[in-house]
Amino acid sequence: MELGLSLGDTPKPFSFLDKTQELVNKDLGFCMALGPRINGRSQEREETGGSSSDPTIQLNILRCSPVQINQTPPSKLSFPWLTKNLLSEPAAPPDANLQEREDGPALSSSPNSTVSSIFPMDLSLYTSHQGRGNKRDFETRLREMERDERGVSNSSRASDHDEEENCLVRKKLRLSKEQLAFLEENFKEHSTLNLKEKQALAKQLNLHPRQVEVWFQNRRARTKLKQTEVDCEYLKKCCETLTEENRRLQKELQELRALKTSQPFYKQLPATTLTMCPSCEWRVASAAASAINITASAATITAATDNTTLCLSKPRSL
DNA sequence: CGCTACGTCCGGATTACATCA
DNA sequence: AATGATGTAATCCGGACGTAG
Protein backbone atom coordinates (compact mmCIF):
# COMPACT_ATOMS: atom_id res chain seq x y z
CA MET A 1 0.00 0.00 0.00
CA GLU A 2 1.15 3.50 -0.58
CA LEU A 3 0.24 6.99 0.38
CA GLY A 4 -2.01 8.74 -2.04
CA LEU A 5 0.37 11.45 -2.95
CA SER A 6 -0.14 12.71 -6.43
CA LEU A 7 2.52 13.98 -8.75
CA GLY A 8 3.45 17.59 -8.59
CA ASP A 9 2.84 18.35 -12.20
CA THR A 10 -0.85 17.79 -11.81
CA PRO A 11 -2.88 20.90 -11.18
CA LYS A 12 -4.35 19.31 -8.11
CA PRO A 13 -1.79 17.58 -5.99
CA PHE A 14 -4.25 15.23 -4.38
CA SER A 15 -6.16 13.50 -7.09
CA PHE A 16 -8.38 11.65 -4.67
CA LEU A 17 -9.69 14.96 -3.42
CA ASP A 18 -11.85 15.05 -6.50
CA LYS A 19 -13.98 12.43 -4.90
CA THR A 20 -13.98 14.04 -1.52
CA GLN A 21 -14.46 17.62 -2.44
CA GLU A 22 -17.31 18.09 -0.01
CA LEU A 23 -15.13 16.89 2.77
CA VAL A 24 -12.47 19.32 1.81
CA ASN A 25 -14.93 22.13 1.68
CA LYS A 26 -16.16 21.45 5.14
CA ASP A 27 -13.03 20.51 6.94
CA LEU A 28 -9.38 21.00 6.55
CA GLY A 29 -7.86 17.65 7.10
CA PHE A 30 -4.89 15.60 6.11
CA CYS A 31 -6.04 12.74 4.03
CA MET A 32 -4.29 9.59 3.04
CA ALA A 33 -5.47 7.20 0.41
CA LEU A 34 -4.63 3.56 0.36
CA GLY A 35 -4.09 1.75 -2.85
CA PRO A 36 -2.45 -1.33 -4.25
CA ARG A 37 1.25 -1.29 -3.80
CA ILE A 38 3.05 -0.88 -7.04
CA ASN A 39 6.51 -2.16 -6.91
CA GLY A 40 8.72 -4.86 -8.19
CA ARG A 41 6.69 -7.45 -6.44
CA SER A 42 3.40 -6.50 -7.97
CA GLN A 43 1.71 -9.10 -10.05
CA GLU A 44 2.33 -7.85 -13.52
CA ARG A 45 5.88 -6.79 -12.85
CA GLU A 46 6.82 -9.95 -11.10
CA GLU A 47 5.61 -12.21 -13.81
CA THR A 48 7.95 -10.62 -16.29
CA GLY A 49 10.85 -11.26 -14.05
CA GLY A 50 9.93 -14.68 -12.89
CA SER A 51 10.81 -16.08 -9.57
CA SER A 52 13.71 -14.37 -8.00
CA SER A 53 15.02 -17.65 -6.77
CA ASP A 54 15.11 -19.30 -10.14
CA PRO A 55 18.68 -19.42 -11.34
CA THR A 56 17.66 -20.99 -14.62
CA ILE A 57 15.66 -17.99 -15.57
CA GLN A 58 18.47 -15.69 -14.64
CA LEU A 59 20.84 -17.57 -16.86
CA ASN A 60 18.51 -17.47 -19.79
CA ILE A 61 18.06 -13.78 -19.44
CA LEU A 62 21.66 -12.91 -19.12
CA ARG A 63 22.75 -15.00 -21.97
CA CYS A 64 20.58 -13.27 -24.46
CA SER A 65 22.15 -12.03 -27.59
CA PRO A 66 22.36 -8.42 -28.68
CA VAL A 67 19.59 -9.10 -31.13
CA GLN A 68 17.41 -10.35 -28.36
CA ILE A 69 18.08 -7.27 -26.38
CA ASN A 70 17.12 -5.13 -29.27
CA GLN A 71 13.95 -7.08 -29.72
CA THR A 72 12.89 -6.96 -26.14
CA PRO A 73 14.57 -4.00 -24.61
CA PRO A 74 13.71 -2.92 -21.13
CA SER A 75 12.82 0.40 -22.57
CA LYS A 76 12.19 1.94 -25.92
CA LEU A 77 15.27 4.02 -25.96
CA SER A 78 16.80 5.58 -28.97
CA PHE A 79 20.18 6.71 -27.82
CA PRO A 80 22.33 7.23 -30.85
CA TRP A 81 25.10 5.12 -29.47
CA LEU A 82 22.91 2.39 -28.06
CA THR A 83 22.04 0.31 -31.09
CA LYS A 84 25.39 0.86 -32.66
CA ASN A 85 27.32 -0.07 -29.61
CA LEU A 86 25.24 -3.04 -28.77
CA LEU A 87 26.10 -4.52 -32.07
CA SER A 88 29.69 -3.53 -32.16
CA GLU A 89 32.57 -2.93 -29.88
CA PRO A 90 31.74 -0.24 -27.40
CA ALA A 91 32.95 3.16 -28.30
CA ALA A 92 33.33 5.93 -25.85
CA PRO A 93 30.02 7.64 -25.24
CA PRO A 94 29.88 11.19 -26.52
CA ASP A 95 30.89 12.68 -23.27
CA ALA A 96 34.19 14.39 -22.76
CA ASN A 97 33.65 13.97 -19.09
CA LEU A 98 34.14 10.27 -19.50
CA GLN A 99 37.65 10.76 -20.63
CA GLU A 100 38.42 12.24 -17.31
CA ARG A 101 37.28 9.13 -15.54
CA GLU A 102 40.02 6.99 -16.88
CA ASP A 103 41.65 6.96 -13.52
CA GLY A 104 39.01 4.45 -12.59
CA PRO A 105 38.78 0.95 -13.97
CA ALA A 106 39.24 0.99 -17.70
CA LEU A 107 36.45 0.14 -20.01
CA SER A 108 36.58 -3.50 -20.78
CA SER A 109 34.15 -5.79 -22.42
CA SER A 110 33.78 -9.18 -21.00
CA PRO A 111 35.23 -11.88 -23.16
CA ASN A 112 32.53 -14.24 -22.03
CA SER A 113 29.67 -11.89 -22.49
CA THR A 114 27.83 -11.64 -25.75
CA VAL A 115 26.55 -8.21 -24.88
CA SER A 116 29.02 -5.43 -24.77
CA SER A 117 28.28 -2.74 -22.33
CA ILE A 118 27.63 0.65 -23.77
CA PHE A 119 29.17 2.39 -20.82
CA PRO A 120 32.57 2.37 -19.28
CA MET A 121 32.81 0.30 -16.20
CA ASP A 122 33.34 2.09 -12.98
CA LEU A 123 32.52 -0.30 -10.27
CA SER A 124 32.46 0.87 -6.75
CA LEU A 125 31.99 -2.27 -4.82
CA TYR A 126 34.26 -1.38 -2.05
CA THR A 127 35.11 -2.55 1.36
CA SER A 128 34.75 -0.45 4.39
CA HIS A 129 38.00 1.06 5.42
CA GLN A 130 36.71 2.20 8.76
CA GLY A 131 35.67 -1.14 10.07
CA ARG A 132 32.02 -0.48 9.40
CA GLY A 133 31.48 -3.68 7.52
CA ASN A 134 29.34 -6.14 9.40
CA LYS A 135 27.92 -9.55 8.81
CA ARG A 136 24.93 -8.25 6.97
CA ASP A 137 27.04 -6.09 4.74
CA PHE A 138 29.22 -9.02 3.96
CA GLU A 139 26.27 -11.23 3.23
CA THR A 140 24.70 -8.66 1.01
CA ARG A 141 27.82 -8.27 -1.02
CA LEU A 142 28.31 -11.98 -1.10
CA ARG A 143 24.81 -12.40 -2.39
CA GLU A 144 25.47 -9.92 -5.14
CA MET A 145 28.74 -11.52 -6.02
CA GLU A 146 27.14 -14.94 -6.14
CA ARG A 147 24.35 -13.70 -8.28
CA ASP A 148 26.78 -12.03 -10.59
CA GLU A 149 28.77 -15.21 -10.76
CA ARG A 150 25.67 -17.12 -11.68
CA GLY A 151 24.47 -14.74 -14.25
CA VAL A 152 27.35 -12.63 -15.40
CA SER A 153 30.69 -14.06 -16.21
CA ASN A 154 32.89 -11.04 -16.11
CA SER A 155 36.48 -11.61 -15.28
CA SER A 156 37.34 -7.96 -15.29
CA ARG A 157 34.85 -7.36 -12.56
CA ALA A 158 36.44 -9.96 -10.40
CA SER A 159 39.78 -8.34 -10.83
CA ASP A 160 38.32 -5.00 -9.98
CA HIS A 161 36.90 -6.47 -6.84
CA ASP A 162 40.30 -7.69 -5.91
CA GLU A 163 41.80 -4.30 -6.49
CA GLU A 164 39.18 -2.67 -4.37
CA GLU A 165 39.64 -5.20 -1.66
CA ASN A 166 43.31 -4.53 -1.62
CA CYS A 167 42.98 -0.80 -1.60
CA LEU A 168 40.45 -0.78 1.22
CA VAL A 169 39.40 2.64 0.05
CA ARG A 170 35.81 3.59 -0.28
CA LYS A 171 35.42 5.10 -3.67
CA LYS A 172 32.22 6.68 -4.71
CA LEU A 173 30.93 6.10 -8.15
CA ARG A 174 29.78 9.06 -10.16
CA LEU A 175 27.49 7.91 -12.87
CA SER A 176 28.11 9.44 -16.23
CA LYS A 177 25.55 11.63 -17.95
CA GLU A 178 24.73 8.85 -20.35
CA GLN A 179 24.25 6.34 -17.58
CA LEU A 180 22.04 8.75 -15.71
CA ALA A 181 20.00 9.52 -18.80
CA PHE A 182 19.60 5.85 -19.46
CA LEU A 183 18.50 5.17 -15.91
CA GLU A 184 16.16 8.14 -15.95
CA GLU A 185 14.51 6.94 -19.13
CA ASN A 186 13.93 3.58 -17.54
CA PHE A 187 12.70 5.17 -14.35
CA LYS A 188 10.16 7.13 -16.33
CA GLU A 189 8.71 3.94 -17.67
CA HIS A 190 8.54 2.25 -14.31
CA SER A 191 9.99 3.27 -11.02
CA THR A 192 10.70 -0.26 -9.91
CA LEU A 193 12.65 -3.05 -11.46
CA ASN A 194 12.16 -6.73 -11.46
CA LEU A 195 15.14 -9.02 -11.52
CA LYS A 196 15.18 -9.36 -15.27
CA GLU A 197 15.07 -5.65 -15.90
CA LYS A 198 17.63 -4.93 -13.27
CA GLN A 199 20.11 -7.36 -14.67
CA ALA A 200 19.56 -6.27 -18.22
CA LEU A 201 20.00 -2.67 -17.23
CA ALA A 202 23.10 -3.44 -15.23
CA LYS A 203 24.58 -5.27 -18.14
CA GLN A 204 23.92 -2.44 -20.54
CA LEU A 205 25.32 0.10 -18.15
CA ASN A 206 28.16 -2.13 -17.12
CA LEU A 207 27.23 -1.81 -13.50
CA HIS A 208 26.44 -4.27 -10.82
CA PRO A 209 22.75 -5.11 -10.47
CA ARG A 210 23.08 -3.91 -6.92
CA GLN A 211 24.17 -0.50 -8.15
CA VAL A 212 21.19 -0.26 -10.45
CA GLU A 213 18.96 -1.32 -7.60
CA VAL A 214 20.45 1.30 -5.31
CA TRP A 215 20.06 3.98 -7.91
CA PHE A 216 16.37 3.17 -8.32
CA GLN A 217 15.88 3.13 -4.58
CA ASN A 218 17.51 6.51 -4.19
CA ARG A 219 15.64 7.84 -7.18
CA ARG A 220 12.34 6.80 -5.67
CA ALA A 221 13.34 8.45 -2.43
CA ARG A 222 14.20 11.67 -4.24
CA THR A 223 10.91 11.62 -6.09
CA LYS A 224 9.01 11.11 -2.89
CA LEU A 225 10.89 13.84 -1.14
CA LYS A 226 10.20 16.26 -3.95
CA GLN A 227 6.53 15.35 -3.98
CA THR A 228 6.35 15.79 -0.23
CA GLU A 229 7.73 19.29 -0.61
CA VAL A 230 5.14 20.09 -3.24
CA ASP A 231 2.35 18.72 -1.08
CA CYS A 232 3.66 20.64 1.88
CA GLU A 233 3.48 23.86 -0.07
CA TYR A 234 -0.05 23.05 -1.15
CA LEU A 235 -1.18 22.33 2.39
CA LYS A 236 0.58 25.41 3.64
CA LYS A 237 -1.39 27.55 1.23
CA CYS A 238 -4.60 25.82 2.24
CA CYS A 239 -3.78 26.51 5.83
CA GLU A 240 -3.05 30.16 5.16
CA THR A 241 -6.28 30.59 3.26
CA LEU A 242 -8.33 29.01 5.99
CA THR A 243 -6.57 30.98 8.68
CA GLU A 244 -7.37 34.15 6.87
CA GLU A 245 -10.96 33.02 6.43
CA ASN A 246 -11.22 32.22 10.09
CA ARG A 247 -9.79 35.57 11.04
CA ARG A 248 -12.27 37.35 8.86
CA LEU A 249 -15.22 35.43 10.27
CA GLN A 250 -14.08 36.06 13.80
CA LYS A 251 -13.97 39.73 13.03
CA GLU A 252 -17.45 39.64 11.58
CA LEU A 253 -18.70 37.83 14.61
CA GLN A 254 -17.17 40.40 16.90
CA GLU A 255 -18.78 43.20 14.97
CA LEU A 256 -22.13 41.51 15.17
CA ARG A 257 -21.75 40.97 18.88
CA ALA A 258 -20.88 44.59 19.30
CA LEU A 259 -23.95 45.52 17.35
CA LYS A 260 -26.03 43.28 19.52
CA THR A 261 -24.98 45.01 22.69
CA SER A 262 -25.42 48.48 21.35
CA GLN A 263 -28.51 47.84 19.24
CA PRO A 264 -30.38 44.76 20.37
CA PHE A 265 -32.97 44.85 17.61
CA TYR A 266 -32.21 44.16 14.00
CA LYS A 267 -34.84 46.69 13.19
CA GLN A 268 -32.30 49.26 14.13
CA LEU A 269 -29.39 47.84 12.23
CA PRO A 270 -27.61 50.50 10.28
CA ALA A 271 -27.76 50.23 6.56
CA THR A 272 -24.01 49.65 6.36
CA THR A 273 -24.34 46.19 7.84
CA LEU A 274 -26.75 45.27 5.13
CA THR A 275 -24.47 46.23 2.32
CA MET A 276 -22.20 43.33 3.04
CA CYS A 277 -24.43 40.86 1.31
CA PRO A 278 -25.03 42.09 -2.21
CA SER A 279 -24.25 38.67 -3.55
CA CYS A 280 -25.77 36.84 -0.59
CA GLU A 281 -22.66 34.77 -0.05
CA TRP A 282 -23.31 31.83 2.23
CA ARG A 283 -20.65 32.97 4.58
CA VAL A 284 -22.44 36.21 5.13
CA ALA A 285 -25.68 34.44 5.67
CA SER A 286 -23.93 32.09 8.00
CA ALA A 287 -22.51 34.96 9.97
CA ALA A 288 -25.92 36.50 10.12
CA ALA A 289 -27.31 33.23 11.32
CA SER A 290 -24.74 33.18 14.06
CA ALA A 291 -25.85 36.61 15.02
CA ILE A 292 -29.35 35.39 15.24
CA ASN A 293 -28.38 32.60 17.56
CA ILE A 294 -26.53 34.96 19.75
CA THR A 295 -28.80 37.92 19.89
CA ALA A 296 -32.29 37.33 18.90
CA SER A 297 -35.30 35.78 20.33
CA ALA A 298 -37.87 34.43 17.94
CA ALA A 299 -39.93 37.51 18.33
CA THR A 300 -37.01 39.75 17.58
CA ILE A 301 -36.20 37.85 14.44
CA THR A 302 -39.73 38.09 13.28
CA ALA A 303 -39.63 41.77 13.82
CA ALA A 304 -36.29 42.13 12.14
CA THR A 305 -37.06 40.15 9.03
CA ASP A 306 -39.24 42.91 7.81
CA ASN A 307 -36.17 44.98 7.06
CA THR A 308 -33.53 42.35 6.52
CA THR A 309 -35.24 39.63 4.60
CA LEU A 310 -32.45 39.23 2.12
CA CYS A 311 -29.67 38.91 4.62
CA LEU A 312 -31.34 36.41 6.86
CA SER A 313 -32.81 34.25 4.21
CA LYS A 314 -31.37 30.83 3.65
CA PRO A 315 -28.24 30.94 1.60
CA ARG A 316 -28.68 30.12 -2.03
CA SER A 317 -25.92 27.66 -2.46
CA LEU A 318 -25.50 25.86 0.77
C1' DC B 1 -3.32 -26.04 7.59
C1' DG B 2 -0.31 -23.45 10.55
C1' DC B 3 4.36 -22.50 11.86
C1' DT B 4 9.12 -21.37 11.13
C1' DA B 5 13.31 -20.26 8.73
C1' DC B 6 15.20 -18.19 4.97
C1' DG B 7 15.78 -15.21 1.01
C1' DT B 8 14.55 -11.10 -1.21
C1' DC B 9 12.99 -6.53 -1.82
C1' DC B 10 11.66 -2.18 -0.22
C1' DG B 11 11.48 2.38 2.37
C1' DG B 12 13.55 5.40 5.54
C1' DA B 13 17.43 7.17 7.79
C1' DT B 14 22.03 7.86 7.62
C1' DT B 15 26.86 7.97 6.15
C1' DA B 16 30.53 9.22 3.29
C1' DC B 17 32.42 10.87 -0.76
C1' DA B 18 32.73 14.10 -4.87
C1' DT B 19 31.92 18.45 -6.56
C1' DC B 20 31.12 23.24 -6.55
C1' DA B 21 30.91 28.03 -5.01
C1' DA C 1 44.35 26.33 -1.08
C1' DA C 2 40.89 25.74 2.42
C1' DT C 3 36.21 25.27 3.56
C1' DG C 4 31.32 24.78 3.96
C1' DA C 5 27.19 23.46 1.28
C1' DT C 6 25.10 20.37 -1.63
C1' DG C 7 24.08 16.21 -4.28
C1' DT C 8 24.05 11.50 -4.30
C1' DA C 9 25.98 6.65 -4.20
C1' DA C 10 26.16 3.42 -0.80
C1' DT C 11 25.05 1.38 3.71
C1' DC C 12 22.26 0.00 7.62
C1' DC C 13 18.09 -1.50 9.59
C1' DG C 14 13.52 -3.14 10.09
C1' DG C 15 9.31 -4.69 7.91
C1' DA C 16 6.65 -7.20 4.39
C1' DC C 17 6.16 -10.92 1.46
C1' DG C 18 6.88 -15.46 -0.84
C1' DT C 19 8.52 -20.09 -0.54
C1' DA C 20 10.19 -24.45 1.19
C1' DG C 21 10.42 -27.73 4.80
Image: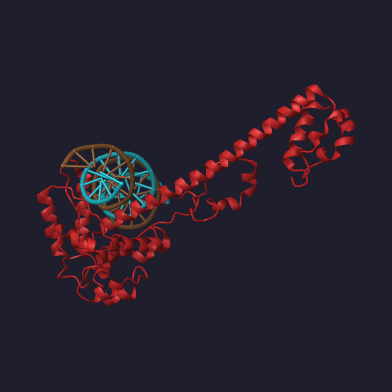
Chain colours: A red, B cyan, C brown
- Location of residue B14 (image quadrant): top left
Give the quadrant of the C terminus of chain A. Answer: top right
Is A35 left or right of A218, judged from the image as shown? right
- Find residue A204 and report its horizontal and vertical position in percent: 26, 67
Asked if one can make out residue A88 in the rendered structure from this viewpoint, the answer is: yes
Which residue: 78% across, 26% down? Answer: A259
Which residue: 49% across, 43% down? Answer: A232
**Nearest the camera: B12 or A292?**
A292
Is A83 left or right of A253, judged from the image as shown? left
Q: Going by the picture, which residue comes out furthest to the top?
A: A261
**Nearest the camera: B10 or A121?**
A121
Which residue: 90% across, 31% down? Answer: A303
Give the answer, above or below, for where A142 lies relative to A57: above
Asked if one can make out residue A51 in the rendered structure from this viewpoint, the answer is: no
- Find residue A243 and report its horizontal and vertical position in percent: 60, 36
- Location of residue A240 (image quadrant): top right
- Find residue A145 and report its horizontal and vertical position in percent: 19, 57
- Find residue A291 and report its horizontal and vertical position in percent: 77, 30
Which residue: 63% across, 49% down? Answer: A21
**Nearest the camera: A250 or C21?**
A250
Is A230 left or right of A121, judged from the image as shown? right
- Location of residue A185 (image quadrant): bottom left
Q: How many marks?
A: 0
**Nearest the camera: A52 or A186?**
A186
Q: Going by the picture, which residue comes out furthest to the left?
A: A166
